[in-house]
Image (tube, rainbow, N blue to C red):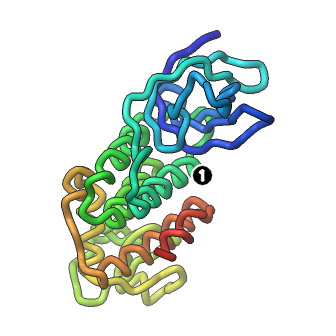
Amino acid sequence: MLYRTEGIVLKTIEYGDADKIVTIYTKNHGKIQAIAKGVRKTKSKFGSSLEILTYAVFLIYKGKNIDIISQTEILESFFIASKEIVKFAFASNCVEVVNKISEEGEVNLSLFFLLKEVLHYLKEAKDPKLLTLSFKWQTLAILGYKPSFNRCCSCNSEIKDQKEMFFNIDKGGVICNKCLSEDKRGCIQVSLYFIKLGRKLLITNLSVISKATISDERMKELEKVTDLYLAYYSDQSFKTDTFLKSL
């Protein structure tokens, strides 16, 4: 059986003398793995269409053990010739997150379009780190791990903005003083700014966030909580995080 789908290349692995196994996040079939035969040959028909961060149309044969990529057509090539190593690294971080936390064959149109958006807007983003962290929060929300920034994640009472705020990683959101006094496990103190920022990041289009900036101090707090929250709910570590922290 032959099928056609749009997709974004998340990862490639060399296989044999001339082939590659390609991981693609597709619009119609979720995350898939497929083999591209002869792609590493000088005169390969695939050109650069199977490079990481490429958005393309794929024509694929349904194989017995693994699907086989027959044809490709590039729709948008993110950072393929870019000399902006920092933005390329943030884009790679986004696709690594999607690759590691998505299940194979599970279709999620919201996540597909969000990934396409973040890669598109990263090219011109004023602050690629802010855009990437925002993408991670929105991804977690799409996958069912949306944090509560308005109500206590333990008793569901409304949280009033106050100077001292606490965020519970385990339970997924802000926690009221009453619940905090009963159990502090998984709680970290955060600023009121972080709570207000979190509320905005979950509902603001990435095109708007790509034009925004925040101070270094606020960024450090956002990055710290994002890393803790993502690690807890994905149970994963990300290689590109290490590289980004070295920049």
Residue 85: horizontal and vertical position, in percent? 43, 61
| Residue 158 sits above or below residue 69 on the image | below
Q: Residue furthest top?
A: 1
Along the horizontal axis of the image, is 234 left or right of 149?
Answer: right
Residue 163 in the image, given as x and y percentages of width and height: 24, 89
For residue 146, say whether it is visible.
no
Dot 1 corresponds to which residue? 100
Look at 55% across and 18% down and name the residue there: 71
Kindly indicate the quadrant of the structure image that contains residue 66.
Answer: top right
Could you tell me which residue is drawn at 50 percent across and 50 percent down? 95
Residue at 20% from the left image edge and 64% from the top image edge: 212
Viewed as shown, does residue 95 lie left or right of 174?
right
Residue 69: x percent and y percent? 62, 22
Return the residue found at the far front.
Answer: 42
Q: Is residue 130 left or right of residue 145?
A: left
**Is the residue 67 above or below the residue 113 in the image?**
above
Amino acid under label 1?
Answer: Lys
Q: Is residue 157 visible?
A: yes
What is the quadrant of residue 188 in the picture? bottom left
x then y, percent, for residue 50: 55, 34
Q: Is residue 104 above or below residue 1?
A: below
Q: Secondary structure at mark 1?
A: helix
Viewer-proximal residue among 233 and 238: 238
Residue at (26% x, 71% y) in the render: 158
Quarter occupied by the N terminus: top right
Q: Residues within 10 Å of mark 1 (few under 14, many from 20)?
A: some
Q: How many marks?
A: 1
Q: Nearer the viewer, residue 77 or 23?
A: 77
